[in-house]
Amino acid sequence: MTLAATRDVHVGVGRRPRFAVIRFPGSNCDQDAVYAVKRTTQCEATYVWHATADLDGFDVVILPGGFSYGDYLRPGSIARFANVMDAVRQHAERGRYVLGICNGFQVLCEAGLLPGALVANIGCKFLCRPVTLRVENANTPFTHTYREGQTLSIPIAHGEGRYYCDAATLERLQRHHQIIFRYAAETDEYAPANPNGSLDCIAGIVNEGGNVLGMMPHPERATDIFLGSADGRLIFQALASAFCGAPTEPGH
Amino acid sequence: MGLNDGEYASILQTLGREPTQTELGMFAVMWSEHCGYKYSRPILSRFRQYREAQAAGALENAGHIALDKDLGIVFKVESHNHPSAVEPFQGAATGVGGILRDIFTMGARPVAILNSLWFGDLDDARSRYLFENVVAGIGHYGNCVGVPTVAGETHFHPCYRSNPLVNAMAVGVVPLRNLAKAAATGTGNPVIYVGSATGRDGIHGATFASTELNEGSESRRPNVQMGDPFLEKLLIEATLEALATGAITGIQDMGAAGLTCSTSEMAARADVGIEIDVRLVPLRDPSMSTYEIMLSESQERMLCVAQRGREREVLSVFERWGLHAAVIGHVTTDGVVRILDAGAIAAEVPAKALTDNCPVYHLEVRERPPIESAPRPVPEPLCAAGENDASGALTCGSALLQLLGSANGASKEWVHTQYDRSVQTQTVELPGSDAAVLALRGSEKGIALSIDGNSRWCRTDPFIGAQLVVAEAARNVACAGARPAGLTNCLNFASPEEPARFWEFRSAVDGIATAAEAFGIPVVSGNVSFYNETAGEPIWPTPVIGMVGILANPDRAVGAAFQRGDNGGQLALVSAFPAGAGPVSCGEYRSVICGDEGGPLPLIDLEAERRLFELLVAGHAEALFASCHDCSSGGLAVALAECCMLGRVGAAVVLRPEPAQTSVAARLFGENSGRVIVSLKNEAGLARLQQLGEAHSIVVEWIGTVGGEVLRVAIGAQTAFDCAVSQMQAVWRRAIPAMMIRAQAPTSASECVGAR
């Protein structure tokens, strides 16, 4: 386990970005996402109902975890047809930020905003536990608050989180540094480093434009030491500080 | 249908005529033990809160306690044993769905699920199949609705082979001023049906639950309901939103006996009648008969009564969430449940005839003395450094590893990693703690939750055994620093019509009531499950206790794991009362080492236990502890091993050699009640803890230090065992996966469903 305390960064004094958290009927991490944004960045975070077709005025869109429409077919396969997804697509095409967490990552893959697919975990079981992530690319709007190679403790909670893509896609992801997080070695010999059998240990990727991130682990569940880890805070702070000048270490 | 001649005669008298088929079906389900509590009601009145609520006509879906001046905690535990025996995945899933509805129907947002599971031995293929699918079913439902499954227990014994027990507990938070009621108030008010459409699943589920299982039970799979957790998620959000409008005067979920139960109970509570037309009910198949519609137990449905003129407000909330919502009738003045089928009367029964006037039986009991142990001597383990004596004799170390590697003693992470325990971001992560702790948003305070049962003790002596179980459940929340504040119980027993079994039930209820009174803990809700027997093979008496405690600083809670590093070095054993001398008590050691399920029960001293809880709460409030762990199954040695394995650190422990006539097995593995292992944050903490011990008349003794890679335990000058933490880990964590590897592959696609 990583125990390196993550230090908060100051969100600067420029414009505070506005966050939208999409609510599909079966989203169940929407409240956690809003709460995490407010607590870690003091920015405004607003619920946006899935039937809405307009995301004007929002800087960052979060697709939260959950089971968007029950997900009995394939996670995200119905959500991609929701009204709001056209707006999310336009938002992404304008270069604005989109963060898909867990089910949100699945929706982004189904909608074609990210390459590849997420399939049933090896072992066919839902898995909820902390995992160790390695930051593979700290040069993105989502991760510029971390150091490359830094390891983070963040929980996963999914049954279909095994990342898969074809060889050409994988080669492209690697060449363009689109693999942002990998499942890293565990100290615990009873829990494999790669919890779900993801290709190349992939836990999170960005699109070619670098403005759409999908990740299976839940950073919004790692925002306080009493929750087991505070390592997830910096993702939200990175997004916020991208609008307010460079992040700074907190002065004491 | 399950009605006897006397009951049928009573129906004729009530109606003054022959009942229609629909009416007969309605009586059969409402007068089943499952709905009517016709055998257990006289016994349950031994719980003071039940007696008072019954007298006041205020029995609600679940009970509650106050968290602070604004918020209440609503909680209840329920069984879904019979359905899980024939259709484990759906049986367990709908058990979770049903108990969640009991919580949010009171206006509370569900914040946690717990479960208590009992199966046959894992070397039996059927038991492995049930275990695998029950766990998958619970995960499937709980993970999707977004309520974390935060704690639980899993037990294995051959007596549960044909009758697994699946008990689910749910906990919710509600502003006290918004507590919803389940009475159909307001003559002329519209009766609104919301949720899923009605289908043919689960017809007569309640009567199925009120008989023993047999070879034919497999054919009753259609009696098992099908759950849809996605719909339940919509129903939670829509119900809470609709209640917030203030337009709803009464609401009840449709669980056992569906529309029959909700209409008659809501009407009876308010002294009114209800008239509905079944053709207004949203149906999955329009050809369903009145009888089928009234007895269906389709899941994810609610019945509510709205203020006249405001029904549109209520309907539109549910419609926005994509749920069925329809006005199907109205509240009347005559006290009759009247069921119309396209305008023609299909049933007319006084509501109270179905509910309050359900016949009550005072069954005979046959007492028996406590079960004495088998005459065979319990082997005494040899003290030896290292795990094994070369001769292959039983040593303390090898006995410990056998306990850690047994199905009951092994780590249950195979189970709980399949449950989402961190959604809602209120779960305080405490590796392997005795209770789950939630830091509730919207309150300074938090809650600690535990669920406990011990049927081996209750079989030996149900009265004392049940008291020991209540004490353990309360001690578990106290170990997390919480004051035990309320309990719920799930009473799983064999056929009440067998006098020896009914005596077990009565004795256990007496035991729970006795302990709850002594601790000053209200019994706020509960559930009875009888007829857990197959072909004359009864389960052991298995009362399960769900406990809720309240704590001031949930974000500072500590778990069971010893801490590495400079802090948390000193170890103390805190005991409510001295252990009795003599042989090893009834428990895991006797069971695993020599197959003996008997033996003397641990002593119980309720008053001393209560002082122990107070001491623990005071110690946590002063932040003295780095870890805190209750000694339970497997005794002191197993508890120490767990603290070490969870913290990945060793310890050196020295126990005093007395009392001299006590066996080594009893010292290490005896399951004496009222003992807690704490590690202290610093040297000063030990002195302060000793002061607290004197103030509360509790024994506090220093027993050693944390550190190294080995757990070494000595009795006086003699080393009893030393085991490397890594070796204990390997045995403890690999046991269940190794037993399940032989289990069959998943049998249906639904088991692979579920991700986020």
Image: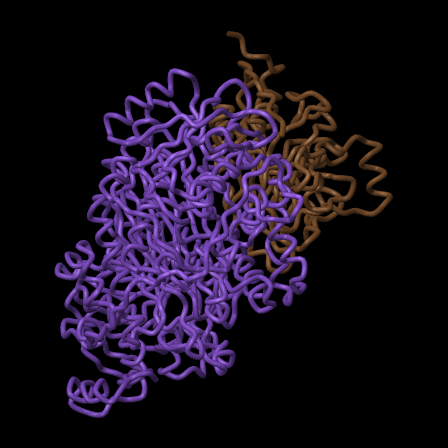
Chain colours: A brown, B purple
Which one is in front, A20 or B563? B563
Where in the figure is residue B702, as x and y percent of width and height?
40, 25
Snapshot quadrant of residue B296? bottom left
Residue B627 or B170: which is nearer the viewer?
Answer: B627
How far across and how far down the image is residue A100, in percent? 62, 39
Of residues B131 and B280, the one drawn nearer to the viewer in this rendering: B131
Q: Which quadrant is the N terminus of chain A positioned in?
A: top right
- Residue furthest toward the top? A252
| Image location of residue B376, percent across then percent down | 45, 60
Tell me: B65 left or right of B241. Answer: left
Q: Which residue reaches farthest bottom? A: B18
How far across and down, in percent of the image, does residue B424 sit? 46, 41
For residue B553, what is the image quadrant? top left
Looking at the image, how many numbered discs can be counted on the residues? Answer: 0
* Residue lying at 17% horizontally and 64% vertically, measured from the top left: B270
* Residue at image point 26% right, 60% down: B509
Q: Residue at x 24, y 58 (%)?
A: B60
Q: Residue at x 24, y 49 (%)?
A: B516
Residue B249 appears left or right of A137: left
Q: Can residue B473 be seen?
A: yes
Please, is residue B297 above or below residue B736 in the view? below
Is residue B100 at all visible to an observer of this figure? Answer: no
Position of residue A170 relative to residue A123, above or below, is above
In the image, residue A210 above or below residue B145: above
Q: Is residue B395 above or below residue B19?
A: above
